Amino acid sequence: MNANEIIEIENKHNSGTYAKQPLVIVRGQGALLFDIDGVEYLDCSSGHGVANLGHAHPKIAEAIYKQASTLITLFETFPNDKRAELMEKITSLVDGLDKVFLCNSGTESVEAAFKFARISTGRKNIVAAMRAFHGRTYGSLSATFNKKYREGFEPLVPGFSHAAYNNIEALDKAVNEETATVILEVVQGEGGVYPASAEYIQAARRICDERGALLIVDEIQTGFGRTGKMFAIQHFGVMPDLLTCAKSLAGGVPMGAVLIGHNVKNLTPGAHGSTFGGNPLSCAAAVAALTVMEEEDLPGQSAAKGKYLMEKLKKIESPNIREVRGMGLMVGIEMKQKVAPYIKMFQEKKIIALNAGMTVIRLLPPLVITYQQIDHLADVLGEVLATDFVTE
């Protein structure tokens, strides 16, 4: 099939829930994607933060092949060698979070964390942040702030409220003795690439402790080296009670997890479950992915490359740029106008980037991106963003 035929088939049969791009991608290698005609694109989206290890990493491919030839699926009732190996490895990444629930996606990990917080505390209320994005299923959607994701799906789950992000006073007022949990992103991704302050995260821990609430940190996008640490919360020396993660955990294979601390109680058989959660195929991929992250020091690479990229971006002279911000290789460029036309122009120049809201360009390149590729990215961004380009 050629590109037009593939696009025609997808347009005929897709659900309509995705805004399709006129670009048929068939292959990836490292930080590059290739269309059906062999044209290469520098991927600065990583599949919304999934491809931290890049595309088609040979060690991930090898692990998947070996496990698929051995055992693909097994319900977690039965212990398994690869699952045990993953559980031991992932719980070693954060001190004090020594248990784990395995699932298939980020939104599932958030749903599980909410259930665990409610059953643990016996309380119902959940406080999230303004601009937060935690997923699209009903519990995670109720914690998500942007009305564009919520409209048309009400009534949502009761008991949720939102407080201003990075505002200690607002959080202090929102949390009380009826609050089961507070859920926060250390860097808001979809909300505009806003990093939290250390004071805010530390205050969240203190406030939760004072009121008897649990603290959930959502690391679905920030986890596994993206911000320059294995998890973004490690920049601040704060330990949450529950940590949700997914995206790059299994090197691109769908997988999510909730890391669980000592304050979480009452998790007994039947409290929650997942048919595919912890299946041997995903576990084998995750073990391989975590091993690569450690062997290649991807968090360290992210810190160094992120600093290098930010320095280049801040040198771009453009009256259209309001601010450049981020952490590691999670970077936001806030513009003074809508960014959709910029994203389109980048794609024309063979750069794939994301937006984060109406006015922020979000860059999430694979952590294996080379310095030469970063130089090229900065050159293209400088050319496009310095242009006197007026959006409609």
Image (cartoon, helix red, strand yellow):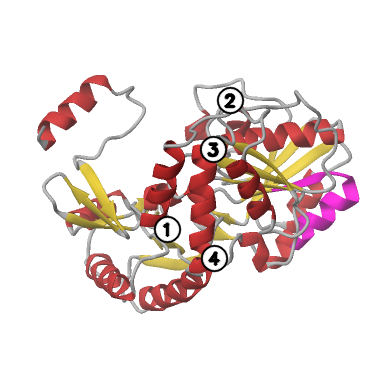
List the residue tagged with mark 3: 280
From the top left corner, tell me how far across and down residue 158 is, in percent. 71, 25
Q: Secondary structure at mark 3?
A: helix
Residue type, numbered disc 2: Thr
In primary-sequence order, the first of circles 3 and 4 is 3
Q: CA distance from mark 3 to mark 4?
A: 21 Å
Q: Which residue is pictured at 22% across the width and 65% down the height?
A: 388
Residue type, numbered disc 4: Glu
Q: Does residue 211 belong to the magenta stretch?
A: yes
Q: Nearer the viewer, mark 3 or mark 1?
A: 3
Q: Secondary structure at mark 4?
A: helix
Q: Secondary structure at mark 2?
A: loop
Residue type, numbered disc 1: Leu
From the top left corner, tell me how far across and down residue 31 is, in percent. 32, 60
Q: Are marks 1 and 4 in contact (CB under 8 Å)?
A: no
List the residue tagged with mark 2: 275
Taking the image as shown, residue 108 lies to the left or right of residue 320, namely right
List the residue tagged with mark 4: 294
Q: Would you identify the image quadrant in which residue 348 lies?
A: bottom left
Magenta-drawn segment:
202-216
Graded by Cα atoms within 10 Å as few (under 14), some (14 to 19) or many (20 or more), the crowding at tag 1 reads many
The N terminus lies in quadrant: top left
Q: CA distance from mark 3 to mark 1?
A: 20 Å
List the residue tagged with mark 1: 53
Q: Secondary structure at mark 1?
A: loop
Please say whether residue 388 is visible from this viewpoint.
Answer: yes
In primary-sequence order, the first of circles 3 and 1 is 1
Q: CA distance from mark 1 to mark 4?
A: 11 Å
Q: CA distance from mark 1 to mark 2?
A: 27 Å
Q: Nearer the viewer, mark 3 or mark 2?
A: 3
Q: Which residue is pictured at 80% across the width and 51% down the height?
A: 172
